[in-house]
């Protein structure tokens, strides 16, 4: 019986280890250039003028803290409403500087960007995009954007 317990304990540990490996998330391989391309995908959707197309870049429960609104947008309808008004200005974004961090099925793109509008006015802002792999594609899980304050 004692010999049998020496055999059972290692087998139990091995099966636990195998189960942990099977349930551990599989990390999607991605590089900084691919994550940078997600901003271009988002910016191209802005150029489309279609607020629903822009909102489709976000997870259903994504958080948007927009540049030119004080209202936090938590639903697809709220994000679409914000982008309807924002897109009326015909914005085009350009990254001024960025840092990208990549984890397992998550990535963060943080930096500064400038929007140029149809009337040639501009707004410079700080941004943070957090992305997650939803099993099919990369989606925005949080997006914070705030106007760069005047230098003091």
Image: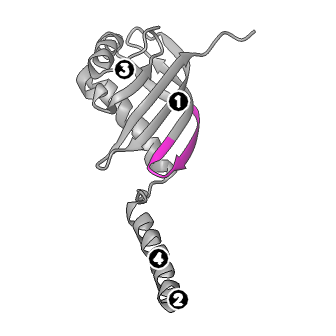
What residue is at 53 percent from the left and 48 percent from the top? Answer: 102
- Mark nearest the camera among 3 and 1 is 3
On the question of residue 49 being in view, the answer is: no
The residue to which callout 2 is attached is 2
Badge 3: residue crowd in 10 Å (few <14, some 14–19, many ≥20): some
Discs 4/3, front? 4
Q: Which of marks 4 and 1 is in front?
A: 4
39 or 73, which lies in front? 73
Circle 3: element type: loop
Q: Does residue 11 sit above or below 109 in this rendering?
A: below
Q: Is the magenta stretch mostly helix, strand or loop?
A: strand
Few, some or many residues within 10 Å of mark 2 (<14, 14–19, 20+): few
Q: Are marks 4 and 2 in contact (CB under 8 Å)?
A: no
Q: Is mark 4 on a helix, strand or loop?
A: helix
Q: Distance between the residues labelled 1 and 2?
A: 59 Å
- How far separated are the C-alphas under marks 3 and 1? 16 Å
Query: Which is in the foreground here, disc 1 or disc 2?
Result: 2
- Answer left or right for 56 relative to 91: left
Q: How far apart, in angstroms, are the residues tagged by discs 4 and 3? A: 44 Å
Q: Which residue is drawn at 31% across and 15% down?
A: 78
Q: Is residue 131 magenta?
A: no
Q: Is residue 69 above or below residue 16?
A: above
Asked which secondary structure carries label 2, the reply is helix
The quarter of the picture where the C terminus appears is top right
Find residue 74 and name its label: 3
Chain part drawn in magenta: 96-107
Q: Which of marks 4 and 2 is nearer the N terminus?
A: 2
Q: Residues within 10 Å of mark 1 (few under 14, many from 20)?
A: some
Q: In this view, does 66 lie above or below 104?
A: above
User: Which mark, by number, is residue 14?
Assistant: 4
**Residue 132 on image: x %, y %:** 41, 42
């Amino acid at each position: 019986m004692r010999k049998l317990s020496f055999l059972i304990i290692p087998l139990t540990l091995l099966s636990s280890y195998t189960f942990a490996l099977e349930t551990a998330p599989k990390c999607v391989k991605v590089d900084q250039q691919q994550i940078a391309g997600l901003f271009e995908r988002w910016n191209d959707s802005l150029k489309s003028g279609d607020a629903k197309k822009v909102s489709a870049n976000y997870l259903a429960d994504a958080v948007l803290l927009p540049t030119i609104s004080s209202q936090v947008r938590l639903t697809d309808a709220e994000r679409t409403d914000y982008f309807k008004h924002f897109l009326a200005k015909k914005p085009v974004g350009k990254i001024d500087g960025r840092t990208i961090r990549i984890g397992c099925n998550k990535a963060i793109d943080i930096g500064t960007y400038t929007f140029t509008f149809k009337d040639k006015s501009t707004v410079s802002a700080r941004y943070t995009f957090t992305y997650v792999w939803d099993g099919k594609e990369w989606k925005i899980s949080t997006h914070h954007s705030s106007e760069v304050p005047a230098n003091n």
